Image (spheres, rainbow, N blue to C red):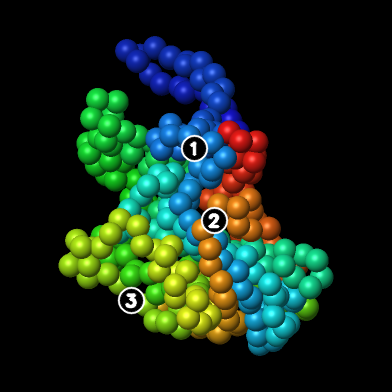
């Protein structure tokens, strides 16, 4: 992509006609997926064979039952009313494998649904209603600002402050995390699809939607006292113990957009009065450490979509796929 000035600038200086030559064509800075993966490695370090982001996680398996009521919006076979096998992964954002479970950072839930026609549907979600960037450049700058100082071994507060001051699109998620303590467990959190997607029904009608998964165990957040006394690592053992008692469930809710709702900015929420429809239930029946488990090698690419579901032009959504591919290739290769 290029920027150029196609007109000559003309001006008068001391009564003389001055003709300014056109500026040379300049290459616009284009951020690549390789650069984002590289800055993650620079900031968090490299753990060979592991994910570059959401490195810390736990595997789970279960099923999803989609409701036929979704047929109004999509022809996807995942809403046939029949159980669909699911491989899931609960995670903490970032590339630090030792991040404490009390950290005020987004939690993640990624799903791979194996559909009866042989297709696959991926769903990658966060515990915050919005994403922390409206563009890949903000993602890059956020990670870069957190790179540890070589002397202190910790991020430079001034760099983080400067990032926040210059990237207002990061503020909605940052404010949400500041005002809402982390959930007490992975099963007591809602998970949001963040991006808008296009649902397409059999009549080829397109409906813009966002989705979220709401826990039947209820949303519960840690108190300030719990944050102070909780051990650094408890989420995995708590999940495994809970699932052994009985399956854990989340309802899938669709939010239906109206004309004018943004489809390409994951930092902007739609108004709360938008229509919501329950279209299915996720059930998790077993959980286990990720090492050697089924979810470990899966690349949860958010653009792996079933027929009847298509991406929007959200630049962050479209950027995630190549970045995930690079990270996946590195870890599968043992790097």
Q: Quadrant of the C terminus?
A: top right
Q: Quadrant of residue 281?
A: bottom right
Distance CA(mark 3)–CA(mark 2): 25 Å
Q: Secondary structure at mark 2?
A: loop
Residue 47 numbered mark, or none: 1
Instruction: Provide residue 187's location: percent of width, then percent of height.
Output: 44, 73
Q: Secondary structure at mark 1?
A: loop
Looking at this view, is 62 or 27 the one in front?
62
Front position among marks 3 and 1: 1
Q: Nearer the viewer, residue 136 or 45?
A: 45
Name the outermost residue toward the right: 117
Judge from the rendering whether residue 44 lies leftward or rightward of residue 7; answer left or right. Answer: left
In front here: 1 or 187?
A: 187
* Residue 300 visible at all: no
Mark 2, other Cα within 10 Å: few <14 / some 14–19 / many ≥20? some
Looking at the image, residue 168 sits to the left or right of residue 217; the answer is left
**Where in the figure is residue 202, as x and y percent of width and height?**
78, 78
Counting residues from the start of the chain, the first of labels 3 and 1 encountered is 1
* Residue drawn at point x = 28 percent, y = 66 percent: 180
Ranked by sequence position, the earlier of labels 2 and 1 is 1
Camera-side residue of 13 and 294? 294
Pointer 3: what residue? Answer: 220
Q: Which residue is mark 2?
A: 290
The x, y position of residue 26, in whole percent, is 54, 24
* Quadrant placement of the N terminus: top right
Judged by depth in the image, the label closer to the viewer, 3 or 2, is 2
């Amino acid at each position: 992509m290029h920027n150029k000035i196609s007109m000559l600038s003309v001006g008068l200086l001391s009564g003389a006609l001055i003709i300014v030559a056109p500026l040379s064509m300049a290459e616009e800075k284009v951020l690549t997926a390789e650069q984002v993966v590289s800055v993650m490695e620079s900031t968090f370090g490299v753990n060979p064979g592991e994910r570059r982001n959401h490195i810390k996680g736990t595997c789970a398996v279960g099923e999803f039952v989609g409701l036929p009521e979704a047929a109004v919006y999509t022809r996807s076979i995942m809403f046939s009313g029949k159980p669909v096998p699911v491989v899931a992964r609960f995670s903490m954002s970032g590339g630090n494998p030792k991040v404490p479970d009390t950290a005020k950072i987004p939690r993640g839930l990624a799903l791979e649904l194996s559909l009866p026609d042989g297709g696959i549907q991926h769903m990658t979600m966060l515990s915050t209603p919005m994403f922390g960037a409206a563009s890949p450049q903000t993602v890059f700058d956020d990670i870069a600002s957190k790179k540890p100082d070589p002397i202190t071994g910790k991020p430079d507060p001034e760099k983080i402050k400067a990032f926040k001051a210059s990237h207002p699109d990061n503020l909605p998620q940052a404010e949400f995390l500041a005002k809402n303590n982390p959930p007490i467990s992975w099963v007591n959190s809602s998970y949001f699809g963040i991006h808008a997607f296009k649902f397409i029904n059999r009549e080829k009608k397109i409906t813009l939607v966002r989705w979220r998964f709401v826990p039947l165990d209820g949303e519960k957040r840690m108190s300030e006292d719990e944050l102070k006394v909780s051990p650094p690592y408890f989420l995995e053992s708590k999940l495994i113990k809970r699932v052994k008692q009985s399956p854990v469930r989340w309802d899938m809710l669709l939010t239906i957009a109206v004309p004018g709702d943004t489809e390409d900015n994951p930092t902007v929420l739609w108004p709360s009065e938008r229509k919501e429809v329950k279209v299915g239930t996720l059930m998790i029946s077993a959980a286990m450490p990720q090492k050697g488990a089924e979810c470990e090698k899966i690349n949860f690419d958010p653009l792996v979509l079933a027929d009847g579901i298509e991406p929007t032009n959200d630049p962050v959504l479209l950027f995630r796929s190549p970045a995930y591919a690079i990270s996946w290739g590195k870890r599968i290769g043992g790097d």
